[in-house]
Image (spheres, rainbow, N blue to C red):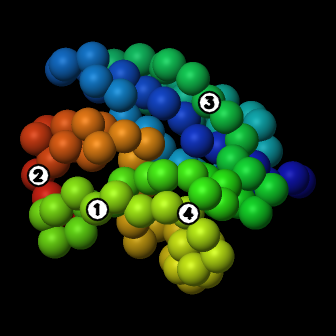
Amino acid sequence: MRKYKVTTVLRVPSNGRKWIVTREFNGLSHYENWVNKMDDTGYGYDESFVTHDSGAPFSEGDDYYTIEDGEVIESCWDDISLIEFNKDPSKNQYFITKGDALEHIKIFGTKK
């Protein structure tokens, strides 16, 4: 069975903001079941895309944001980012925009 790493953009029910989640799925039916579960809990499906060949959520040179010690940190994806990501993909939550990271802090606080 082929594994897929998929990034999905969902809408938070309370405010309509985006929630970006990257997960690995054991086949497309596993992914579809997860999307249906999110839909059943009120999260609105916005879009999905399979991550890059490396399995990482970004390509070299892409800007991205993380939350570290309660601060939004801007970074540029490079070889070191990929090494750190491959060590533990769930260690950080990645954001496409600074606004998304700030909204995450506003809604969920600074804890992971």
> What x and y, as percent, mark residue 23?
57, 51
**Does 14 sit above or below residue 57?**
above
Residue 54: percent from left, percent from top: 76, 63
Disc nearest the viewer among 1 and 3: 1
Give the CA distance from mark 4 to mark 1.
12 Å
Distance, label 4 to label 2, CA atoms, is: 25 Å
Q: In this rendering, which labeled residue sits more in front, label 4 or label 2?
A: 4
Give the labeled residue for mark 4.
77
Q: Residue furthest right?
A: 1
Question: Label 3: which residue?
Answer: 48
Residue 76 seen anywhere in this rendered image of the structure: yes
Disc 1: which residue = 73
SS category of the residue bearing label 3: strand
Q: The disc labelled 3 sits on which kind of residue? A: Ser
- Dot 1, crowdedness within 10 Å: few (<14), some or many (≥20)? some
Q: State how far apart marks 4 and 3 are (Cα).
A: 20 Å
Q: Quadrant of residue 102?
A: top left
Give the residue drawn at x 48%, y 30%: 9
Amino acid of disc 4 = Trp
Q: Nearer the viewer, mark 1 or mark 2?
A: 1
Q: CA distance from mark 2 to mark 3?
A: 25 Å
C-alpha distance separating marks 1 and 2: 15 Å
